[in-house]
Amino acid sequence: MNMSNLFEKINENFNQTATIACFNFLPFTRMFRKNIFANVNDCNRVIQKLVGERENNFDNEFITNIVDAYLDEMTGNRQQSTYFSKENLDALVQDLFVAGTETISNTLNWAIFYIVAHPTIQKNIHEEIDHVIGKDRPPCNSDRSRMAYIEAVLLESMRCHCAGPILLPRATTQDITFHGHFIPKDTFILVNMWSAMKDEQYWPEPEKFDPERFLDENRQLRNVNHPAMMPFSVGKRACTGEQIAKIQLFLVLVSLFQKFEFRFANGWIPNDLRGQPGITLRPPKCQYEAFVR
Ligand code: HEM
C-alpha cells in the first residue's frame, strides 16, 4: 500500500466516525462495519513497516525526528521504563498520523473554499503575500508574525468549520454538579466545541465568513485566545499537534496562493457556504481552476 492509499483509508474511517461511535453502545453493530477494522489493520501494517525501516537505520548520532528520539529513549539508559516500548512507538506514530492528516486536509479544503467564494479576500491574501514574501521566495514559519491577514483567514476558517467539532470522549471521575446539573461519576461526556465557535453572543452573524473578526484597527491579530475560540481544544487532552498544524496550514495555504489565483471551474457559484451535510462536514463538491499569477 502506498501513502496515498494510506491517506484514503484514514479518510474513509474519519468519514465513518458517527458509525464508530455507536460501537460503544451497540457492540453487535461492529460486524456490519468490518472494513473499518480492516482499514485500521492495513494502516497499522504500513506504519509498522515505516517505523521498522527507521529502526533498522537508527543512528543515535543523528536524531532528526520523533521516531529517532523515541528509539533513543528506548535503547538508552532509560530502557527500564515501562512506557518506552516498540508497541507504544507504533501506537504513537499511528496516533500522530491519524490525528494529523484528515484534520489538516479538511481545514485546508474549507479555507480554500471560503477564499475562492470571496474574491476580495483572495485579493487581500495575494496582496499580503506579495508585500511580505514576494512571488519567488518560499514561505517560512517566521513569516507568520508579519502576515496577520492570512492568519486571520485560517482562524476564521477553523471557527466556521473546526475539524474536531465534538471533542474526544471523556468520563467524569467523580460525582459533580455543573451549572446546576448533577452528573454522576463514570458518565460518558461529549463536549460540543462547535456550539462555542458558533455562539451569537460572541460571534455576531456566526455563519458569516469574516476574517476581520480576528483583526484590530491596526490590522494586528485579535481574539486568538478568545475563550469561545478553541479549534484545538484546551486542557490536558488538547491537540498535541496544534503548533505543527498551524505551521503546516500556513505554509501550504501561502504556497498555493503565492503562485496561483483560484476560481471555481466553469463559472460555478456555491448556493450556500454551509457545506454538504454528512457524517463529517465537507465543503460542497466543487472543482477549481488555478491560474498562474
Ligand atoms: C487543523 C488541524 C488540527 C485540528 C483542528 C486539530 C484539533 C484537535 C482536537 C479538537 C482534538 C481533540 C482534543 C480534545 O478532545 O480535547 C485533537 C486531538 C489530537 N490531535 Fe489534533 N488537530 C489538528 C491537527 C493535528 C496534527 C497535525 C497532529 C499531529 C501531528 C495532531 C495530533 C493530535 C493528537 C495526538 C490528539 C489526541 C490528544 C490526546 O488525546 O491527548 N492534530 N486535535
Image (spheres, grey):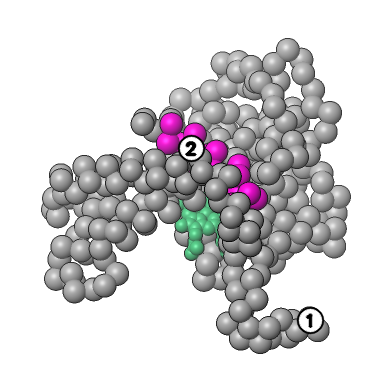
285 in relation to 92, above or below: above
Q: Residues within 10 Å of mark 2 (few under 14, many from 20)?
A: many
Pick whichever, 273 or 168, lies toward us. 168
In the rendered view, does 274 fall on the left or right side of 80? right
Residue stretch rendered in magenta on the structure: 5-21
Could you tell me which quadrant the C terminus lies in?
Answer: top right
The dot on residue 9 is: 2
The dot on residue 243 is: none
Residue type at mark 2 is: Lys
- Residue 7 lies in the magenta stretch: yes
Pick whichever, 241 or 135, lies toward us. 241
22 in relation to 106, above or below: below
In the rendered view, does 39 fall on the left or right side of 285? left
Identify the residue at image location x=65%, y=50%: 18
Identify the residue at image location x=76%, y=15%: 267
Q: Residues within 10 Å of mark 1 (few under 14, many from 20)?
A: few
147 in relation to 293, above or below: below
- Work out whether mark 2 precedes mark 1 in sequence or the reverse, and give the earlier one: 2
Element under label 1? strand
Pick whichever, 75 or 139, lies toward us. 75
In the rendered view, does 134 fall on the left or right side of 229? left
